[in-house]
Image (cartoon, rainbow, N blue to C red):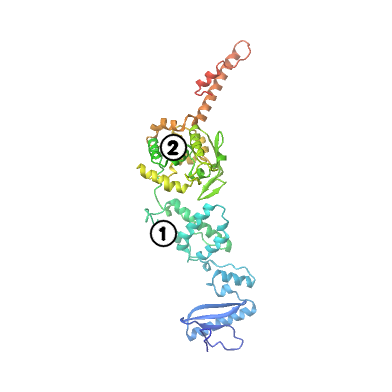
Amino acid sequence: MRNKTAKIEVFDNSGENREGAVIRKPGSKKLYVLFYYHGRRVEKSTGLDDTPPHRRQVRTWLDRQMERIKAGKFVFAEAFPAAPEEEKAWFAQKEGWEYQPEPKDVLFGDYVRQWYLKVWEGIRSDTKRTDWKGVIDYWLVPNFGQMNFYQISGPVVKRFIAKELFWKNGTHKGKQLSKKRVKNILSPFRAIWRDACEEFRWVLPNPFGNITRDDLPDTEEKERIVFRFDDWQHLLAHMDPWYVPIAEFMMLTGVISSEVAGLRRSDVRKDHILIQNTIVRKVEKNKCKTTYRVRKIPMTQAIKQRIDQALSRSSSDYVFTKPTGQKFSAANFCDKVWNKAVLASGLSHRVPYCMRHSFAAWSLTLKVDMLRLVDLMGHRDKKMVFEVYGRYVQGLEQDVEKILNYFGQDFILPEMKQHAILAMQQAMTSQLLVQMQQPFAPAQLPENTTTSRQTAGLSW
């Protein structure tokens, strides 16, 4: 018989106690089942072409499901494993059990949409949320969105690394991403996989477990550029004068752009500068990346000169600002000021971060104590200083005098002071020993303490 109002073909569903219907939609050659379950219309394709044998097969299957519904034994997720997860979860709740889908039932893209609501929004770091979402939307969903979790295996991930992780646009188009960048892409991938397995209690082989160094791009490590002193002065001569004291402050302290942006007037003390706030992508954070990044930088005359210059030209709560009085922006400084100055100077391309590398290399050239440099730069230990900054820079030893004059004698004062104190203590100890060997007389301090201090290399 035909049901013209519904615009579907309803086949012979007559018979004693028969419920539900086998139908075919206009323009389709496939058979569908149609019934109501928990007050909700269920209309699903069988995937079978409309033939008399298939009609009988589907009708038999539907009768069996109707019997299971009456007996309270019907499970929607088992009857329709390809149904959307939300639909299966809704019926599971009505059926009174906790729905746990199989890995084959869950598409990566579908799970990501739920993961954004359950997990991603709870990530405290704004930077991490932004970075991960960019990776997921640009790299992961386009490549894995239509794959279920059972299909995502180790070989599939390795093929993704080898075939897909290349620059898509720009001057590096077609080149492999760096090893560090690939690791950053795999981090949210691994987190989503782990969360899905824990949520649904899946026991699956870890697709990331067998990824080794050999599977990652063998790209060359980026060259860490260190300024020669004359090149630094040449760059400053081509920089917007407003930003020169800001750039010099970075060179004199080793702080990074986000720390410069977050530096407030209240962080400037008489004898030191407290680094404790950052502004990353316009979001201010009162918590540094690590506890080691919270640090005190001694106030030298060279640093004070740049700080005073910045404070005198703005009434902002922040030390460093744009000419408009707005907060300093790391991105704006790099794009509009730094890159423009590098291009005008004719120097090879380099990024603002090379000022931090230069600060470390210049400090080591001045024989600054390694542990003190670790503290100034906010590192945990000497490993980073040794591995990253401790490399020899050709010709830098010829700039020692210029660097010392630029940083100022008070920059290396702590080292000089320690030597001076040690020398004076040794001199006093020697004189006391001599006095103990002489006939009794009232003990006397060294007659010329000032001379001893000057001999030690420092006048207090």
Q: Residue furthest left?
A: 346
Q: Position of residue 166 (x, y in %)?
A: 40, 56
Residue for point 38% across, 43% down = 342
Image location of residue 418, percent across then percent down = 53, 27
Q: What amino acid does circle 1 point to?
A: Glu
Residue 40: x and y, percent?
60, 76
Counting from the top left corner in percent of width and height, residue 405 is at: 44, 30
Amino acid type for the residue under numbered disc 2: Ala
> Which residue occupies 51% across, 22% down?
456
Is residue 149 in view? Answer: no
Quadrant location, the C terminus: top right
Residue under numbered circle 1: 164
Circle 2 is placed at which residue position? 361
Which class describes the residues within 10 Å of circle 2: few (<14), some (14-19), or many (20+)? many
Residue in the picture at 53% in, 77% down:
44
User: Eyeballing the image, is 7 above or below 396?
Assistant: below
Q: How many marks?
A: 2
Which mark's residue is nearer the viewer, 2 or 1?
Answer: 2
